[in-house]
């Protein structure tokens, strides 16, 4: 019986396996690479960070900021890309990725001032692409298109043209239309339901006002004409504001489309084998 | 000896046993939805003189009508809050025009799918979009703009 008790007692006190074989630098590196290729960038950076200094090499030094960039943590990515060793085989690529990250982070002015006098084709492309996002004057169409490969020229030309002549709607026209026919300004902006509602509301109060004045109900006549007036002027104001919102929508959709296109094209920067 | 072993055995069991009982404790969950009136700001804090007049009107409407009538406005902020906010952000004239435009958009029966939403499903339509300021923070349609 004692033996059984002793056996049970010791069986509970045996600790789980605590061998550190799993956590050797080689295994940690393999695991981090596996996480990176599985797009689990946050955990891969954590695992790379566990490696001792002597285990870190050019690839890891480059992959860490790249992981931050792919996660959208642009400030950290920029900081780490800048600290890539000049002797590294990935140094040139990390410089390109640094400028690409600046573009992704929306730091266009910084990118433009840093690349203003750079003649290298890859950098020139990034510089020109940044002009598609800012309100700064666009470069000449010929120069712009020359920097890009043939396969991207057609799409970029359409982005270039849209940037040059955005399909905005005039807030002045919209307000003017609504002043002439209530709701027509909204219809001009594509808000047909709002336009018809405004027309019906204004017409209804105008009719009620007219009808009450005709029946000598002066108080109600003034009340409805006051309300009608506010609906009328409110609609003119709303048409001007809606034109502004319409134009903000045009800008938003343009940027979304452009960002999606550039992401698919990797911002015209040569890709890396380990990000596939 | 048996006795000692038994004591050790029981203590070993207890030491290795699950001790995080609080994890399984009973939790009181409140399923009631917070009504919009619970977030209403009845204060008159504003430097805007027109705002005082409009806020009195809006507070009276909330107290005597809206709280009794229920949460019916499909927008966030609701039309009455929109009026109070619009007047506070601009002035009484501009704020009133913004309100009448909002009210017209509210009575449009085809408004579905034209606005971004708050997390509770209401249409997100803040007065800041209509102040005619230079910069508009556009939110795409049907996107969850803010959590409420």
Image (spheres, rainbow, N blue to C red):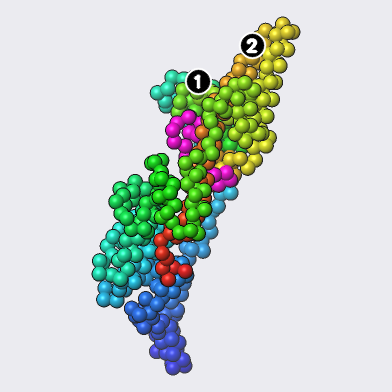
Whether residue B130 is in magenta: the answer is yes
Whether residue A197 is in magenta: the answer is no
- Residue underneath mark 2: A222
Residue at 41% x, 45% y is A140
- Residue underneath mark 1: B93
Relative to A124, does residue A196 appear above or below in the rendering? above
Relative to A221, does residue A195 appear above or below in the rendering? below
**Closer-to-camera residue (B60/A241):** A241
The chain letter under disc 2 is A
The chain letter under disc 1 is B
Q: CA distance from mark 2 to mark 1?
A: 19 Å
- Position of the N terminus of chain B by quadrant: bottom left
Most frequent secondary structure within the magenta stretch? loop
Magenta stretch, residue numbers: B127-143
Identify the secondary structure beneath mark 1.
helix
Q: Position of residue A29 (x, y in %)?
A: 37, 76
């Amino acid at each position: 019986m004692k033996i059984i008790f002793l056996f049970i007692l010791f069986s509970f006190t045996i600790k789980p396996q605590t061998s550190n074989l799993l956590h050797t630098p080689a295994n940690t590196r393999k695991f981090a690479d596996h996480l990176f290729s599985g797009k689990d960038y946050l955990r891969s950076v954590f695992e790379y960070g566990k490696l001792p200094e002597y285990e870190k090499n050019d690839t890891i030094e480059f992959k860490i900021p790249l992981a931050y960039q792919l996660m959208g943590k642009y400030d950290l990515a920029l900081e780490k890309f800048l600290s890539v060793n000049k002797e590294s085989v990935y140094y040139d690529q990390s410089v390109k990725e640094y400028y690409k990250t600046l573009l992704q982070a929306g730091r266009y002015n910084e990118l433009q001032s840093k690349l203003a006098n750079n003649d290298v084709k890859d950098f020139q492309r990034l510089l020109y692409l940044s002009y598609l996002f800012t309100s700064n004057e666009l470069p000449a169409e010929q120069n712009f298109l020359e920097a890009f490969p043939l396969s991207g020229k057609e799409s970029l030309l359409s982005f270039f043209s849209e940037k040059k002549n955005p399909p905005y709607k005039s807030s002045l026209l919209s307000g003017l239309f609504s002043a002439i026919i209530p709701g027509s300004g909204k219809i001009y902006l594509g808000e047909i339901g709002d336009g018809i509602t405004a027309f019906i509301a204004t017409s209804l109060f105008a009719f009620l006002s007219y009808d009450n004045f005709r029946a000598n109900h002066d108080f109600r006549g003034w009340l409805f004409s006051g309300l009608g007036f506010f609906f009328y002027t409110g609609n003119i104001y709303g048409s001007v504001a809606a034109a502004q919102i319409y134009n903000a929508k045009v800008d938003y959709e343009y940027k979304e489309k452009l960002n999606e296109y550039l992401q698919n094209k990797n911002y015209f920067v040569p890709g890396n084998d380990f990000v596939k | 000896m048996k006795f000692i072993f038994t004591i050790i055995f029981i203590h070993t069991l207890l030491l290795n046993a699950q001790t995080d009982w609080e994890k399984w404790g009973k939790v009181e969950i409140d399923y009631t939805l917070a009504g919009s009136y619970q977030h209403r700001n009845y204060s008159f804090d504003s430097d805007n003189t027109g705002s005082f007049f409009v806020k009195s009107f809006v507070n009276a409407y909330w107290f005597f009508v809206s709280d009794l009538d229920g949460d019916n406005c499909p927008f966030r902020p609701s039309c009455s809050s929109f009026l109070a906010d619009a007047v506070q952000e601009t002035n009484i004239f501009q704020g009133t025009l913004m309100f009448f435009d909002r009210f017209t958009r509210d009575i449009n029966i085809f408004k579905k799918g034209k606005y971004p939403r708050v997390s509770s499903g209401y249409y997100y339509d803040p007065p800041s979009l209509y102040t005619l300021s230079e910069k508009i923070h556009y939110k795409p349609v049907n996107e969850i703009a803010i959590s409420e």
